[in-house]
Structure formats: C-alpha cells, structure tokens
Image: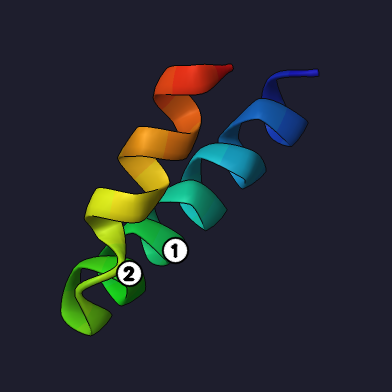
Amino acid sequence: MQIIYGFFSAVKDELTELLKKNGKWDLIQLFLGEI
C-alpha cells in the first residue's frame, strides 16, 4: 500500500509541475476545490 501511495504522490508532483509550466494550475485548483 505504501508503494502505491508513493507512486501516486510522485505522479501528482510531476503533473503539478507540468500544469504549473502550462499555466493550467489555477484551473486544476478550482476543480479540486469543488470536490
């Protein structure tokens, strides 16, 4: 379970960096805020 969590955490960090570079992070934060 810890391995899976670590994997998802790493993927999330990668996606965060990509989205920040593309300027889409604000949209994602708004979307996550709705959940």
Vertical arrangement, residue 29 with respect to residue 26, above or below: above
Residue, far right: 1
Q: Secondary structure at mark 2?
A: helix
Residue matched to label 1: 15
Q: Residue at x 35, y 36 (%)?
A: 30
Which mark is in front, 2 or 1? 2
Three-letter amino acid code at the position of disc 1: Leu
Q: Quadrant of residue 22?
A: bottom left
- The x and y percentages for residue 35 are 58, 17
Q: Residue at x 69, y 20 (%)?
A: 2
3 relative position to 24: left or right: right
Q: Residue at x 55, y 56 (%)?
A: 11
Mark 2 in CB contact with mark 1 (< 8 angstroms): yes
Q: Secondary structure at mark 1?
A: helix
Residue matched to label 2: 19
Three-letter amino acid code at the position of disc 2: Leu
Instruction: Name the one closer to the observer, 19 or 12.
Output: 19
Residue, far bottom: 22
Q: CA distance from mark 2 to mark 1?
A: 6 Å
Q: Residue at x 33, y 38 (%)?
A: 29
- The x and y percentages for residue 15 are 44, 63
- The x and y percentages for residue 10 are 48, 50
Instruction: Name the one closer to the observer, 17 or 26.
Output: 26
Vertical arrangement, residue 5 with respect to residue 23, above or below: above
Instruction: Name the one closer to the observer, 18 or 8.
Output: 18
